[in-house]
Every structure is written in structure tokens, then in C-alpha cells.
Image (spheres, grey):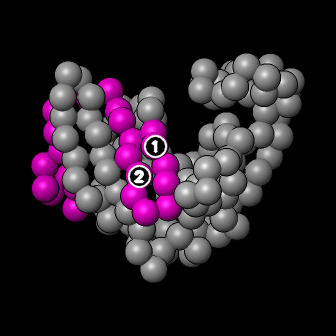
């Protein structure tokens, strides 16, 4: 793990991804760079976000964070996990048992990363900027205490 890896930021990424799915039906990010100071997620999309959409995105993510939802793991046999989740981003050596990270009733996702125990540990989510180029929407964000 990178020394700048931050479980708070990684858990916020999960919430951001589910919020993007719910708001825009665009799917989870296909690429992400998650670090303690600031992070970015890339989505297949058709335009940049408006100021109003960014404000709503921040509000929804922060609503989930402030809900004090439990973050926990479950383990599923690969066969069952393949029926419920996209496993393409998992390493090839992930094995026959797949770890699923659940954030309350809001999000479930296969993941091998470190996470916090409750969303209340995350802090406040802020979008720094967004940009659109060649069918890719990039959302840059940070957390504050």
C-alpha cells in the first residue's frame, strides 16, 4: 500500500461511486487515483457536470457520510459474487472467495482495500473540480475534518 493511502478517502470513493450510479446511471468509476490529500475518479460519461449537479453530488455524498453508516465486510463464493457484482477490477489472484465491502444499505462492492468502520470517520466530502474530455468525466475531490 502507498504511504499516502487513506482508508477514509477510499471509503468516500465507494460512496461517490454509488452516488454517481444513482444520480446519472453511469456506472462506477473505471479508473481512480485515491490518496490522502486529494483523489480522482474517472467515469464513462457524455459531458461535464454543472455547478448544480456538483452541489447535489456533494450534498448526497455528505448525507451518506453523516448517516453514521456501518462499513463492514462480507465474503462470498466467487460464483455468487460474479452474479451480483462486476469483478473485472479485482486482481487475477483474488481467489475463490470474494471480499465485499458494504456501507450501510447504500453501497456494496468487491474490494481488497482498507476501510474505516463507520462513515462518521470520513469527514466532509468536497468536489475540487470536474472536467470532461474524450468521453471521460473526471471528478477530483478531497476530504476535510
Task: Locate residue 62, reporting x and y percent.
Answer: 41, 68
Question: Tag on residue 33?
Answer: 1
Q: Is residue 112 visible?
A: yes
Image coordinates of residue 79 in percent, x first then y, are: 80, 19
Q: Is residue 76 above or below residue 53?
A: above
At x 13% / y 56%, what residue is drawn? Answer: 51
The segment highlighted magenta reads: 32-56
Residue 141: percent from left, percent from top: 35, 57
- Per the image, label 1 sits on a secondary structure element best described as strand
- Residue at image location 73% in from the left, 19% down from the top: 92
Q: In this orientation, which residue lies closer to the viewer: 50 or 32?
A: 32
Q: Which residue is mark 2?
A: 39
Q: Rate crowding at label 2 as few (under 14), some (14 to 19) or many (20 or more) other CA atoms within 10 Å.
A: many
* Residue in front for this viewpoint, 135 or 67: 135
Q: Position of residue 95 (x, y in %)?
A: 84, 25
- Asked which secondary structure carries label 2, the reply is strand
Q: What's the CA distance linking mark 2 and mark 1?
A: 6 Å
Residue 119's mark?
none
Amino acid at each position: 500500500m502507498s504511504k499516502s493511502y487513506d482508508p477514509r478517502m477510499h471509503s468516500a470513493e465507494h460512496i461517490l461511486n454509488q452516488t454517481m450510479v444513482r444520480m446519472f446511471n453511469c456506472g462506477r468509476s473505471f479508473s481512480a487515483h485515491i490518496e490522502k490529500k486529494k483523489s480522482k475518479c474517472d467515469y464513462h460519461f457524455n459531458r461535464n457536470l454543472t455547478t448544480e449537479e456538483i452541489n447535489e453530488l456533494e450534498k448526497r455524498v455528505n448525507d451518506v457520510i453523516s448517516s453514521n453508516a456501518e462499513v463492514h465486510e462480507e465474503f462470498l463464493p466467487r460464483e455468487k459474487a460474479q452474479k451480483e457484482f462486476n469483478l473485472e477490477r479485482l486482481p487475477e489472484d483474488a481467489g475463490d472467495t470474494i471480499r465485499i465491502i458494504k456501507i450501510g444499505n447504500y453501497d456494496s462492492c468487491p474490494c481488497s482495500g482498507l476501510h474505516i468502520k463507520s462513515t462518521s470517520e470520513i469527514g466532509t466530502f468536497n468536489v475540487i473540480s470536474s472536467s470532461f474530455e474524450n468521453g471521460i468525466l473526471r471528478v477530483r475531490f478531497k476530504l476535510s475534518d
